[in-house]
Image (cartoon, grey):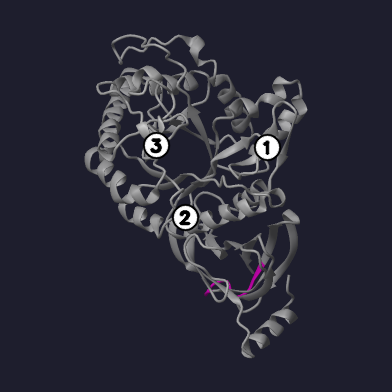
């Protein structure tokens, strides 16, 4: 942290020709509404509940506290598995007759949701159908089929809708109401994991039929709340803007409540392109993670990739951002925030600490504001360097700034605030290779400027309040 004297020294160095990296924040140039952060309980739900199953009840509660108390999130994403209808229940999709025993896998979801809602009653649940049961698919298997591209058999669109609705109804009956739902997960990608493939036209046609089915079931079963549909939930935001979303809006637009997409194709200004198509609909980044080998301390390099993706998304119009998964078994990749040995113990990664730091000061209803990075460490889309984004409170008195050095070198920084925050006080937190959301000394902005050194591979968060 630099003192006012060091700021003067930095300004003298600038006059002598040394150029800092500059973050310029314009709090009065408000953009889209911030609507929340989220994370998933996907694939490893039983891992999440395994501590309690092993009799380690106190440690299980500590895990839930780390997930849902210490880390302030707004959305919990759930996976609909292909298990609760091994054979067709009957020939009428409007008369569900499912055997309760096949919903046993949902016991883990219910425990996790209960723990989340206990700690954050406002938590909203979002369910994604990864694949329908094998008997509905062309490859007769839950996997996506890889190059064979397993798809839904023609004529079974309403059976798929019934299958998804049965999960929503089951969760609601057990006290955990799903508010948002996607009919597919990365249907644009030839997966071998659970999944199924849909062309843009197939996706749009299925979305229209599922939307109509949900309307009819809401009429017949008014006790089960009608979910909002998040679409198209594809892997590539680039292809989403070019093909999947335009086709979905053209053929099933009235059923697209939220535009949602993953962030695994990080070419160009993908979120700007999607924002332009959304109209008044919210834009969600529904999944991102980094699964390349990472031997850095605590996965700090992977954490930096999260910071890079979050700043790009919010700077280009995203309303909600969701990390992929809360818990995975220990590994070198950055897929999850927490690593848990089945039934034994867990470890918080740097991804978790940085995500917790990012989420803590952000409240739905804040607005993203124009933020620019210039100077020697500025970089382009999906490139290493210094990244920054900022958000202002509804009353205009509180400003949250996130600055990340997604690089192996420290950066000399000068932060400049536009009109309205010339004189303000700031509290600060930092995650770095040596710090975990550490609280740093508070300081005052003078004439809207402040200088600091941003360590390599670090996230610095400022909460700035007007005098």
The disc at residue 161 is none
Q: Which residue is mark 3?
A: 190
Provide the major secondary structure of the magenta segment.
loop
Q: Is disc 2 placed on a helix, strand or loop?
A: helix
Residue 361: horizontal and vertical position, in percent?
61, 53
Q: Earlier in the sequence, mark 1 or mark 2?
A: 2
Q: Nearer the viewer, mark 3 or mark 2?
A: 3
Nearer-the-camera pick, 69 or 298: 298
Nearer-the-camera pick, 272 or 170: 272
Graded by Cα atoms within 10 Å as few (under 14), some (14 to 19) or many (20 or more), the crowding at tag 2 reads: many
Residue 249: horizontal and vertical position, in percent?
26, 43
Identify the image quadrant of residue 331: top right
Q: Is residue 420 magenta?
A: yes
Mark count: 3
Q: Which residue is mark 2?
A: 313
Range of residues picked out in magenta: 418-425
Q: Residue at x 39, y 11 (%)?
A: 87
């Amino acid at each position: 942290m630099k003192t006012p004297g060091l700021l003067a020294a930095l300004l003298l160095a600038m006059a002598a020709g040394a150029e800092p990296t500059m973050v310029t924040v314009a709090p009065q140039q408000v953009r889209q509404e911030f609507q929340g952060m989220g994370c998933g309980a996907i694939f490893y739900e039983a891992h999440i509940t395994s501590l309690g199953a092993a009799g380690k009840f106190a440690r299980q509660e500590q895990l839930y506290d780390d997930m849902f108390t210490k880390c302030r999130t707004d959305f919990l994403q759930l996976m609909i598995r292909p298990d609760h209808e091994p054979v067709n229940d009957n020939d009428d999709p409007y008369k569900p007759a499912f055997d309760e025993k096949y919903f046993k896998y949902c016991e883990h979801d219910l425990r996790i949701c209960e723990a989340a809602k206990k700690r954050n009653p406002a938590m909203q649940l979002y369910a994604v159908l990864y694949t329908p049961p094998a008997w509905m698919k062309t490859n007769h298997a839950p996997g996506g089929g890889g190059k064979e591209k397993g798809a839904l058999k023609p004529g079974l669109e309403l059976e798929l809708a019934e299958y998804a609705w049965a999960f929503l109804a089951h969760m609601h009956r057990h006290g955990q109401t799903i508010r948002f739902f996607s009919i597919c997960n990365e249907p644009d990608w030839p997966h071998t994991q659970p999944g199924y493939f849909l062309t843009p036209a197939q996706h749009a046609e299925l979305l229209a039929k599922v939307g109509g089915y949900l309307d009819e079931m809401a009429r017949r079963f008014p006790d089960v709340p009608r979910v909002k549909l998040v679409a198209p939930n594809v892997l590539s935001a680039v292809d989403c803007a070019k093909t999947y979303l335009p086709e979905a809006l053209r053929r099933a637009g009235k059923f697209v409540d939220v535009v949602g997409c993953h962030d695994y194709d990080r070419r160009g200004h993908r979120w700007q392109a999607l924002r332009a198509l959304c109209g008044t609909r919210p834009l969600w980044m529904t999944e991102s993670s980094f699964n390349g080998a990472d031997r850095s301390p605590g996965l700090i390099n992977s954490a930096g990739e999260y910071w890079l993706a979050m700043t790009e998304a919010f700077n280009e119009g995203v309303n909600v951002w969701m990390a992929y998964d809360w818990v995975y078994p220990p590994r070198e990749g950055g897929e999850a925030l927490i690593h848990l040995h089945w039934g034994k113990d867990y470890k918080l990664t740097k991804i978790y600490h940085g995500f917790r730091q990012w989420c803590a000061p952000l409240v739905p209803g804040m607005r993203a504001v124009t933020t620019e990075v210039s100077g020697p460490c500025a970089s382009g889309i999906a490139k290493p360097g210094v990244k920054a984004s900022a958000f202002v409170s509804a009353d205009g008195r509180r400003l949250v700034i996130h600055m990340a050095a997604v690089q192996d070198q420290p950066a000399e920084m000068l932060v400049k605030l536009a009109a309205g925050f010339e004189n303000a006080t700031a509290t600060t937190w930092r995650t770095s290779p040596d710090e975990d959301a550490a609280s740093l000394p508070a300081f005052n902005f003078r004439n809207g400027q402040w200088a600091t050194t941003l360590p390599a591979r670090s996230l610095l968060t400022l909460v700035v309040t007007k005098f």
